[in-house]
Amino acid sequence: MSEQTMAGRTVLVTGASDGIGAETARELAARGATVHVTGRSADKLRPVAEAVGTEPLVADFSRLDDVRRLADEVGERVGSLDVLMNNAGGTFAPSHRTADGHEPNFQVNHLAPFLLTHLLRPRLAAAGSSPVVNTASIGNLMGKIVLDDLDYEHRRAIEFLAYGTGKLMNIAFTRGIAQRWADDGIVSVAVHPGPVGSSFGRDSWLVGLLYRSPLKRFATISVPDGAAPLIALAERGPDPEVNGRYFSRFQVDGRENRQAHDQAVIDGLWERSAALVGVA
C-alpha cells in the first residue's frame, strides 16, 4: 500500500488513456488523491477511470470545442483543483490539419492545453495554491517558435521539428504562467519524463516505426520510470522554488532551447495563443 502522500488533493490528468498519463493517474490515486482522467479514446480511458474511481472525461485535443466542454465538465465536478497535469500530446504529420484548421503538433501539444489551463484557472486559484505540471521534452532543443507563423502557413513543417516546437512552447507557457499567475497561488513547472516506451508516436508513421521495432527496448525507458518524475512533481506541490523551471526527469534546469528564456517569445506566444482561442 502506497503512503497517502496525496490524500485530500484533487488532480486532473490529461492524456490518461494509456502510457505515463495512465500510470501517473493510477499511482496518484493509490497515494490518496481524487484523480480525474481525460483522453480521446473512451475504450482505453474507461479502465483507467475505473481504476482510479472516477468517471472518464473523453475529449479530443484536436477539437477545441472538446477542450471547452471538458473544462465545463471538470468545473461541474470539482470546486477546486489542487494539481493539473497537462500530459496530453504526441507527434503528428504536419500535413494534416485539425478540426479547427491548425497544424496538429501546435494545437494538440500547446494550444489545447493552453486553453484548458486558462479555463481551469478559477478552479486552480480556488485551491489556494496549485501546481500545473506540463509534460515537455528534450525535443524542445529542436524547436523554433516563429510568432508570425505558428501554424506553418509560410514555411515547411517537418514532423520532428514541429513536435519539438510544441514542446518548446510547453516550456514557454510554463514561464508565462509563473510570471502572470503567481498572485493566484499557481505554480507551473515543465518536465521531460525521458524516452518512454509507450504508445507515443502512434499518430506518426516515422516515430511509430521506431516504437514498433526491436530498437524500442534499447531507445526507451519503462512507463513507470517515465511517470515517476511527474508523480514526484505532483507530490512536491506548489513549491515556489521550482516555479517556471524545466526538469529533465528529476534534474532541475534541464537543457533548453535558448528561445525558452526569450521574453519576447514568452510574451508573444501567450498573446497570440490567447487571441486564437479567445481567452484574456
Image (tube, helix red, strand yellow):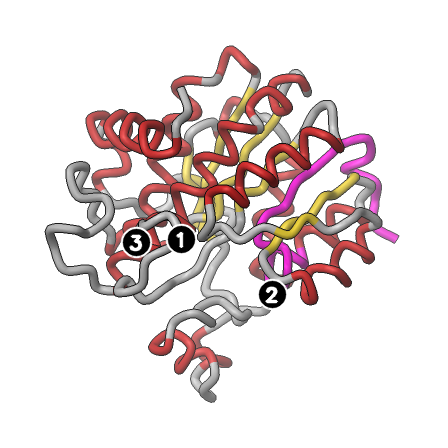
User: Could you give the CA–CA distance between mark 3 and mark 2, rounded to whole angstroms?
Assistant: 28 Å
Q: Is residue 21 magenta?
A: yes
Q: Quadrant of residue 198?
A: bottom right
Mark sitting on residue 132: none
In the image, taking residue 27 as reference, residue 156 lies left or right, namely: left
Q: Residues within 10 Å of mark 3 (few under 14, many from 20)?
A: many
Whether 32 is drawn above or below 209: the answer is above
Look at 40% across and 82% down and name the residue there.
Answer: 209
Label 3 sits on residue: 103
Image coordinates for residue 136, horizontal then vertical, percent: 42, 48
Query: N-terminal of the two: label 2 or label 1?
Result: 1
State the image coordinates of residue 196 (x, y, percent, origin top left). 51, 66
Return the residue nearer the eye: 258 or 212.
Answer: 212
Check if mark 3's residue and mark 2's residue have beta carbons within 8 Å: no
Amino acid at circle 1: Ala
| 235 sits left or right of 201 in the view | right
The residue under label 2 is 223
Name the side, left or right, on which 130 lies relative to 162.
Answer: right
Nearer mark to the viewer, of 3 and 1? 1
Instruction: Tell me where the magenta segment starts and ends, as one range.
Output: 1-23
Numbered tag placed on residue 99 in the rendering: 1
Identify which residue is drawn at 32% across, 50% down.
Answer: 101
Q: Residue furthest top?
A: 183
Position of the C terminus by quadrant: top left
- The mark nearer the N terminus, 3 or 2, is 3
